[in-house]
Every structure is written in C-alpha cells, then in structure tokens.
Image (cartoon, helix red, strand yellow):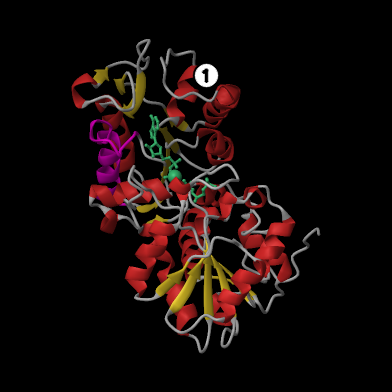
Amino acid sequence: MDLTGIKFIDQIELAEKSILIRVDFNVPLDAEQQITDDTRIQAALPTIRYAMEQEDTKVILMSHLGRPKGKVDESLSLKPVGERLAEILGVEVLMPEDYGGKFVQKLISDMRNKQIMLLENLRFEPGEKGGDPAFGRLLSGLADVYINDAFGTSHRKHASMYHVAKYFDRYHKAAGFLVKNELEQISKLTSSPATPFTAIVGGAKVSDKLGVLNTLVERVDHLLIGGAMAYTFLKAKRVEVGNSLVEEDFVERAREIMFKATQRGVDLRLPVDHVVAASIDADADSVESSPRASIPKGMAGFDIGPVTIDQYKGIIADSKSIFWNGPMGVFEREPFANGTMSVAKAIAESDSFSVIGGGDSAAAINVSGYQDEISHISTGGGASLQMLEGKELPGIEALRANYPFEF
Ligand SMILES: Nc1ncnc2c1ncn2[C@@H]1O[C@H](COP(=O)(O)OP(=O)(O)O)[C@@H](O)[C@H]1O
Ligand SMILES: O=C(OP(=O)(O)O)[C@H](O)COP(=O)(O)O
Ligand SMILES: [Mg+2]
C-alpha cells in the first residue's frame, strides 16, 4: 500500500495535547458479557501507552462493539472492556454516557494523571454507522489530535473512522502502531507472495465478504471455503443445504465467482461433507456427521466434515503463502470446533508465510494453542480481506495529507 502523506503516531507532536484514539475493541463476549478473547485490546496497548507517556497528554479512546442498531443496547456496552483496560493499565477509565457536549468536555478538561477516557459504544448512535459527518465533527471536538489504531474497522466509512479525520490537519492526525504493523505485514501478501498462495475463507459475515472473493480469486492459486460462507456457494451449485445459513441475494454472485475460478484455473474448494445438527444449541448427542456435500432436510451445517478437513490439510501443507479469515464452523461450541482447530494445526505445521485475520479467527487461533506458529495474526478480518483485494481502506485514506474530502 502506498503510504504517501500518511504520518504515524511517533511522527507528530503529542505533548500537552488531548489525543482521540479510534481503537477496535469489538471483542468476542460470552452470554454473561465476559470477554472471551482480548487480542484486540492487547494489540492496541503500545499506542495507548505511548500516548499516555508523552508529556501532559489526555487520552480519549473510542470504539464500536458488535452491531447494535443505532440505539442503546446494554448487552453491547463497552463497560467490560473499560474494566479490563483499567486492570491492564492500572489507571482509572472514565466512561461517560455521552459522546460530546459540555459535560464530556468538562470531564476531559478535569482529567488528571492516571485517568483515561473510553467513550461508550459508538454504534449506539445512528450517525456512526450512517457515516454522518455531524457525528464525526462532534467527536473531533473532543481533542487536539486524532489517531486511527482501529485496523479491523478501517474498511468502514463510518463517522469515527472517516468523517472525524476531516477536522484535523496533517500535523494533527496519524496512524497508530497497530495499524502500522498490520499494513507492513499484510503488504507481504499483496506484493508478489510466494506461491502456491492459498486463501481460506469462512465465518458468518457472508454478505459482507462474499463480494471480496470476486477479486481475491484473481490473486490466489487455491481458495478454500468453509464456515457459513460455504452454504451460499453450495446452493449456487444447486446442492441441498437444509436449514443452513444462506444469503439468497448472493447466490448469483457465488455462481459468478465459481465460474471465474474455473476460467482462471483457480482451485476453488467447497466442503464435501459436514457436521450437522437441528440447531446451533444442539447437545453433543444430537450432532451428526453428514458424509456428503448435501445436508439433510431439517438439519443445518455448523462445521466442515473429516473428508473436507483432509483435503484442505493437503492443500495447506503444500502452500507457501496462506491467508485465513473466518472460522470453518461454530468453533465456540465444542461439537463444531474440529474443522477450525484442524485447519489451525495444518497452517501451524506448514512451511509458509501465514496471516490469520479477524476478531473471531484470532480468538480461534488462540484457543487452538498454535498462535506462536503463525507469521502474523491480524486484528482485522474484513479489513485485511479488503486490503488483499487491493481496494483502499477509507479509514487509512482519511489520514492522508490533503485528502480530497467532500464536505
Ligand atoms: N456454519 C456456520 N453457521 C453459523 N455460524 C458460523 C458457521 N461457521 C462459522 N460461524 C461463525 O462465524 C463467526 C465468525 O465470523 P466472522 O466475524 O466473519 O469472522 P472473523 O471475526 O474472523 O472475521 C464465528 O462466531 C462462528 O461461530
Ligand atoms: O469484527 C470486525 O470485523 P471482522 O469480524 O471481519 O474481524 C470489526 O470490528 C468490524 O466490525 P463490523 O463488521 O461490524 O463493521
Ligand atoms: Mg468477527
């Protein structure tokens, strides 16, 4: 990626400034709102600590969590994240209920040493996801300097990622250390990666990510599909998929991607067997192995099956570059974890440059225990996919000096 006109946090003056840092604290939570994986918090610490350590600074963090629909949803509050952060950093984390206005301004001006601020989930405000410039402007009023360290959200043209940056000139906005590291590492897969190059794509954000495969298929030798993504493709091949998750609006796109792969001689693989159950909450006894590509009526696929695992393992073992986004199944539940864990092991044992990206994929690799065998664990799934596709990331573009914003 061309970094012309983009500054990093250590290239701008921070002393005596209030610093607004957009982080991606969209961490996986369990039913009790406990954080199950804090990779994204840990990954942002170098930037947060650096900002705190400069002379007389005030640090204000902001993030989204999950996908609330532009209104308050207590189950998606950032409070558990604020508490974890306070423990890790040994500071008080102020969490106002508002995003701007006199109360928050006063809280910031009264901030003392050993205090930082974390704004509440930005997506409680409709203006965040709606990309409302007014919300970006409100946020910009909180600080002297803006830092983007939310790589995992940099593909979103949201108020806190893009519009906020309009209101800071080139001397007052920069990328953080996490973003810098991500751009450097993922660039290794965009500029002449060693071949064979294999991409493995799964997960649940099918409508978001299926379109990306149309370009990705031009860049890889093998494309292995798993997770919920697989069923839209199987449906496009007119294979019976029972109650599995299918994005009907994307079936035609899936068909086009398969056609393109055939034309270009790209090896696109779909699962040939599955682990199925009547529902995602099924107990282990009612989980079945389904030995063919089709899925029985009344059942849904929640993991790839053993024959598919063997096929994917063989391809992974022969690969020299690997990119993986999206778990192969509902790995959070033990009966559906085998596909994801087996793929993690195969990548760890391969002799390749490997990047695993995504909030949930990073959590999965940590559960597998193979995290130290992976070349780079990225905090972004959709963001790293978009970067591999060769498309601009709005959150990064907005940092460029003289970026031609439309107001
Ligand atoms: N077959 C499936 N059916 C439903 N959900 C699935 C299936 N396979 C994987 N998932 C879910 O996908 C989620 C992760 O998807 P996604 O957010 O796209 O990945 P990442 O965060 O790694 O980018 C996981 O929580 C997992 O349970
Ligand atoms: O979790 C995220 O992306 P990922 O699941 O692709 O890794 C980011 O926080 C972006 O979230 P979004 O896809 O709801 O915009
Ligand atoms: Mg995710």
User: Is residue 179 rendered to the left or right of residue 125?
Assistant: left
User: In the rendered image of this protein, does residue 144 appear above or below residue 237?
Assistant: below
**Residue visible at 46% across and 31% down in the picture:** 229
Instruction: Report the residue at 36% width, 58% height from top.
Output: 39
In this view, which residue lies farthest toward the left?
285
Q: Nearer the viewer, residue 163 or 324?
A: 163
Residue 306: which quarter of the image? top left
Q: Amino acid at mark 1?
A: Ala
Q: Is residue 313 left or right of residue 75?
A: left
Which residue is labeled 1 in the image? Answer: 236
In percent of width and height, residue 243 lies at 42, 17
For the residue pair 80 and 152, the one nearer the viewer reads as: 80
In terms of image quarters, where does ligand 1 lie? Answer: top left
Q: Is residue 40 visible?
A: no
The C terminus lies in quadrant: bottom right
Query: Residue 146 magenta-drawn?
Result: no
Q: Main secondary structure of the magenta part?
A: helix
Q: Is residue 218 above or below residue 46?
A: above
Where's residue 66, x and y in %?
A: 48, 46
Q: Position of residue 362 (x, y in %)?
A: 36, 51
Q: Residue at x 57, y 76 (%)?
A: 108
Q: Position of residue 19 (x, y in %)?
A: 57, 76
Q: Nearer the viewer, residue 342 or 72?
A: 72
SS assignment at label 1: helix
Magenta stretch in the rendered image: 329-351
